[in-house]
Amino acid sequence: MCFTQNFWSLLISGLADGFLYALIALGYTLVYGVLQLINFAHSEVFMSGGFAGYFVLQATLGSHTTSGWGSVGYVALGIAAGAAGGGVVAFLLERVAYRPLRRRKAPRLAFLISAIGASYFLYNIAGKEFGHNALEIPAPFTNLPWFSIFGAPVQAYYVVIAIAAISMLLLVDRVVSSTKLGKGIRAVAQDAETASLMGVNINRIISQTFVLGGLLGGAAGFLFGLNAGVVYTMGFTPALKAFTAAVLGGIGNVRGAMLGGLVLGIAENLPMGCVQTAWRDVIAYGILAIVLLFRPTGILGERLGRAA
Amino acid sequence: MSLLQLVDLEVRYGAIPALRGVNLSVETGEIVTLLGANGAGKTTTLRTISGLQHPASGRVLFEGRAIGDVAPHDVLALGVGHVPEGRRIFPQMSVLENLEMGAYRRRGNLREDVEHVFSLFPVLGQRRRQEGGTLSGGEQQMLAIGRALMSHPRLLLLDEPSMGLAPLVVKAIFEIIARIRSQGTTILLVEQNATQALQLADRGYVLENGEIVMSGAATDLLGDPRIRAAYLGETAAH
């Protein structure tokens, strides 16, 4: 049976992809919640995180190699730099590409065009400045299997992704469900005008929502780059998949984005024992089409501004 | 100085005038009611006071300060609470979270305030974990009022609190409004339910096509044949 072949190692790589999709998908879903806008430039937030991580590590470590706790610090620094890079770009994106349109009460289409424009601008700038070849982030750990689960080898990279992603997902869930920022985000998503009557500064919440999504997307960019390297086009496919995941889980729904990411990652990896890898994207978008056919609001449903 | 004063207030939606030269004042400690038919401009008046709408000309003065161009979240911080038309509860937040939203701009312990709201509306206390969207209309209205009280407003704007509610529930809500005033909150009440509003209020204004056409003590308005004809469903006596 081709499905049982390599089941565990395909599941592990599926989970790793799924965690990254989940982190990126949160950026789409949070912004959609407060603005009913798909931020199609989020792919470049992800890319910026990758580059930020790369350059900060270059600057601090140079060609030094790390081991043990040093490696942990190396990864943590990269994630922090990626998150910061993503957060800054997301913040600027909202200020430059969206806020002026909001102030003028521009039609929805204008936001879409602005998003696409911003995306082209950012990745072309990155291509021009940083070259068209992937820059390799020196791995702080070996590619050799670290341990095995049911006979499937597990590389340190997967452990890093799992730990980093799970902590960030738990943290963002907590932020949305029980902090003042989270309540503000949910209130704006459910009824922005009434939120303003409660004293919520809508513009500030929107800005902070972009930054929150940017932190997660940027961190994901670094984690992705750790394995695949960083290059100006790196955002396109993962971000489109993550957008798919957000819709799959129920756009606007925070836990839906997490679930959608994991489901998509696993679903597109598991059949790889049976078919060629060229089928991967066909499967991913096929799943989206089928789910939406039967459940147009996604797995958990569009629940604007709700934690679950 | 009046707590609230509207001076020659003009508001437009695009080219369409919604308020035309409205003059109105509310003194500290009063209940003032604003009456009028659908589309007369009552809701627009409240929305302009709380900054959701901005005047084309004229002034909104709160404690003497011009607030016509102030954003809603800052108007709230100055001490104006607004219970909007249609209640506008956050449907996917619990009763408790809705109340916490009311105190969004405040710091510190909210327990006393929450208990105060539950003492005014005991049914909300029983439903504190329930989602706002699942409450009945009357309960949602109570929650909307309780939520607005959480910010400790000096002026409370109430937009048709009786809308769509059963007579007994309306009676209970009007009793609570009287109690809120007696605890020191000034109230501007928009209503279509003219009799009950005038029985509760000290003074009233009547709005027609964006203009104030009548104003005076509530008892006088209640006895005025024109009011009785237009809003209380009686035919004018000749």
Image (spheres, coloured by chain):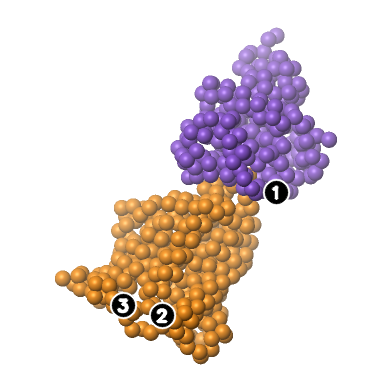
Chain colours: A orange, B purple
Q: What's the residue at 71%, 41% (across, down)? A: B79
Q: Is residue B83 found left or right of B20 in the rendered image?
A: left
Mark nearest the camera among 2 and 3 is 3
Residue A51 on image: x %, y %: 52, 79
Mark nearest the camera among 3 and 1 is 3
In the rendered view, tell whether residue B185 sits above or below residue A167. above
Residue reaching furthest front?
Answer: A69
Residue A186 on image: x %, y %: 52, 51
Callouts 2 and 3 on one subunit: yes
Q: Which residue is mark 1?
A: B74
Residue reaching furthest bottom?
Answer: A63
Q: Which residue is mark 3?
A: A147
SS class, disc 1: helix
Tell me the chain of label 1: B
Disc tally is: 3
Residue reaching furthest top?
Answer: B238
Distance from label 3 to label 1 (Cα)? 57 Å
Q: Residues within 10 Å of mark 1 (few under 14, many from 20)?
A: many
The quarter holding residue B222 reads: top right
Q: Which residue is mark 2?
A: A227
Q: Is residue A143 found left or right of A180 in the rendered image?
A: left
Q: Amino acid at mark 1?
A: Asp
